[in-house]
């Protein structure tokens, strides 16, 4: 009886958390470069002399789906999409690095290349500065070239290269800001094999149909856990009546 009650109770609790995770994925179904997350559960016995019959459902891990999303052509020079595996490195305010697949970039009033959220993009020598009055082009290797919009328009200047990395996926953890970082807090090494496509953006890899099906399935599992709790209560009442009648 104990095992039934505690497994059903904790199972319902964590299924509710999984539903929140799927709702978060669905809310980001159109977010550029978003990576879906998955929660995995399993039941484990409580190794205690005081509670030998109890078992709990626990959250084993929170996994990330690193499958690349679809590419959409925008034609905008500052939009870049990572082709295949890899990440764009960002220079965080605390001096660390974070990694994103969202390549929708812009130049701020100080000429610094940054994300839409105002985080500078990491270059081969730190943040990248873009002088005004220049047309910007980004090569497949992340090399940023400038061509003046007036004067010597045939003069091409290279101002830096996007830091493109591809650390092992198992070493990456998602932060509360949605960006990924290495588990040990170190900076990933540049990977020359990572390529980007200028004028494109990568969409979210969330499969809306799969997520909706999973949401329906979780709701049914949640209802089943509540039904088990109700069954345990009925069994307890029946057992109590038997004892009372004796």
Image (spheres, rainbow, N blue to C red):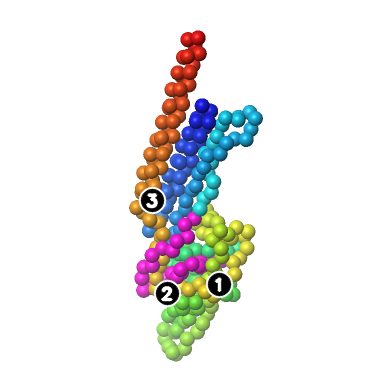
Distance, label 1 to label 3, CA atoms, is 33 Å
**Distance from label 3 to label 2 (Cα)?**
30 Å
Regarding residue 93, the answer to whether it shows in the image is: no
Q: Position of residue 231 (x, y in %)?
A: 43, 27
Count of numbered circles in the view: 3
Q: Which residue is mark 1?
A: 191
**Callout 3: SS:** helix
Residue at 50% x, 30% y: name it: 5
Circle nearer the N terminus (1, 3): 1
Q: Position of residue 145 (x, y in %)?
A: 48, 81
Q: Residue at x 41, y 65 (%)?
A: 202
Looking at the picture, tell me which residue is in the foreground, 137 or 204: 204
Q: Which residue is mark 3?
A: 211
Query: Going from the N terminus, do you reach mark 2 or mark 1 first?
Result: 1
State the residue in front, 141 or 50.
Answer: 50
Q: Residues within 10 Å of mark 1 (few under 14, many from 20)?
A: some
Provide the secondary structure element on which disc 2 rests.
strand
Question: In the image, which residues are magenta?
Answer: 64-93
Q: Which residue is the site of mark 2?
A: 198
Q: Are marks 1 and 3 in contact (CB under 8 Å)?
A: no
The vertical placement of 116 against 141, above or below, is above
**Residue at position x 47%, y 57% from top?**
65
Q: Is 48 or 34 nearer to us in this picture?
A: 48
């Amino acid at each position: 009886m104990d095992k039934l009650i505690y497994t059903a109770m904790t199972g319902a609790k964590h299924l509710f958390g999984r539903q929140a995770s799927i709702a978060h994925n669905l809310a980001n179904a159109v977010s550029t470069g978003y990576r879906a997350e998955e929660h995995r559960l399993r039941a484990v016995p409580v190794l205690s002399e005081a509670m030998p019959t109890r078992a709990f459902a626990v959250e084993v891990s929170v996994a990330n789906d690193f499958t690349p999303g679809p590419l959409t052509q925008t034609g905008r020079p500052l939009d870049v999409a990572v082709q295949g595996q890899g990440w764009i490195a960002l220079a965080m305010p605390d001096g660390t690095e974070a990694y994103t697949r969202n390549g929708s970039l812009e130049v701020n009033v100080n000429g610094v290349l940054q994300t839409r959220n105002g985080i500078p993009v990491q270059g081969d020598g730190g943040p990248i500065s873009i002088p005004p009055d220049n047309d910007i082009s980004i090569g497949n290797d992340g090399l940023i070239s400038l061509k003046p919009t007036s004067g010597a328009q045939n003069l091409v200047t290279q101002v830096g290269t996007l830091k493109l990395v591809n650390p092992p996926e198992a070493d990456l953890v998602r932060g509360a800001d949605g960006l990924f970082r290495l588990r040990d807090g170190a900076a990933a090494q540049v990977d020359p094999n990572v390529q980007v496509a200028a004028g494109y953006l990568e969409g979210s890899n969330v499969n809306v149909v799969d997520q909706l099906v999973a949401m329906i399935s979780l709701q049914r599992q949640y209802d089943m856990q509540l039904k088990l709790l109700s069954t345990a209560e009925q069994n307890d009442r029946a057992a109590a009546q038997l004892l009372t009648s004796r």
